[in-house]
Amino acid sequence: MEVSLLSIFSGLYGITNEQVRAQGLGNIRKFNKLTANTEKNYGQTAFSGEHKPNPSILTKILRYDNKDYYEQTTKPLLQQNFEVKKQQKIFDTVQQIEKHEIDLKDPFTLLDIFCKALNGKYENILEIVAQDLLKVIKVVPCKNG
């Protein structure tokens, strides 16, 4: 599989663990046959990759190059990470909602929320929707969470 060095460098510089990053950078020349042009531009490409870190590039390369490893190891970890972030976002939003009181003199209604949704003003942004819902709905935490 042929991959751009810029993609590899961008992915490696997205890794926060210095030891893993250094090992990956060392393995580029050790395990790959680089063309003369690639050798010539190696330093410049490494510099460019350092300024555009993106660890998800490595995930994409892994998904195409080693599908079994990706499906068995990487994909479950990514899904678990996504679920944790999703739950944290919901928790943060609920915490924010619990702090608000409804202004009974505010003319804002559920119809206003409906109109905003029809006009595309929300675009699935949880915080914005929650802020408008706070104007018309009071959330009371229950004992069992």
Image (tube, grey):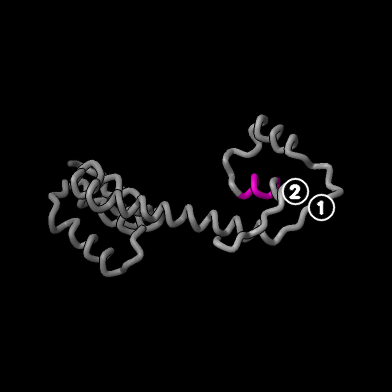
Q: Name the kind of residue labelled 2 in the image.
A: Lys
In the displayed structure, 128 sits above or below 21; it is: above
Say which amino acid is labelled 1.
Asp
Q: Secondary structure at mark 1?
A: loop
Can I make out residue 70 in this image?
Answer: yes
Q: Residue at x 74, y 46 (%)?
A: 136
Residues at badges 2 and 1 in contact (C-beta under 8 Å)?
yes
Please provide the residue range marked out in magenta: 127-132
Q: Is residue 35 left or right of residue 74?
A: left
55, 78: nearer the viewer:
78
Place of residue 133 in the rendered image (x, y in percent of width and height, measured from the top left)? 69, 46
Q: Position of residue 114 (x, y in %)?
A: 69, 34
Q: Quadrant of the N terminus?
A: top left
129 within the magenta span: yes
Q: Is residue 95 above or below residue 107?
A: below
Q: Residue at x 22, y 64 (%)?
A: 23
Residue wearing tag 2: 135
The secondary structure that dominates the magenta segment is: helix
Q: Which quarter of the rendering shows the C terminus?
A: bottom right
For mark 1, what is the residue? 103
Give the farthest residue toward the top.
118
Local packing at callout 2 (Cα closer than 10 Å; few below 14, some 14-19, many 20+) is some
Answer whether residue 54 is magenta in the image: no
Query: Quick one: SS at disc 2?
Result: loop
> How many numbered marks, from 0 up?
2
What percent of the width, then of the height, locates residue 79? 36, 50
The percent position of residue 34, horizontal first and vertical second, equals 16, 49
Q: Along the line of sight, which residue is nearer the eye, 99 or 21?
A: 99
- Tell me which residue sits at (50%, 58%) in the image: 88
Question: Residue 17's image quarter?
Answer: bottom left
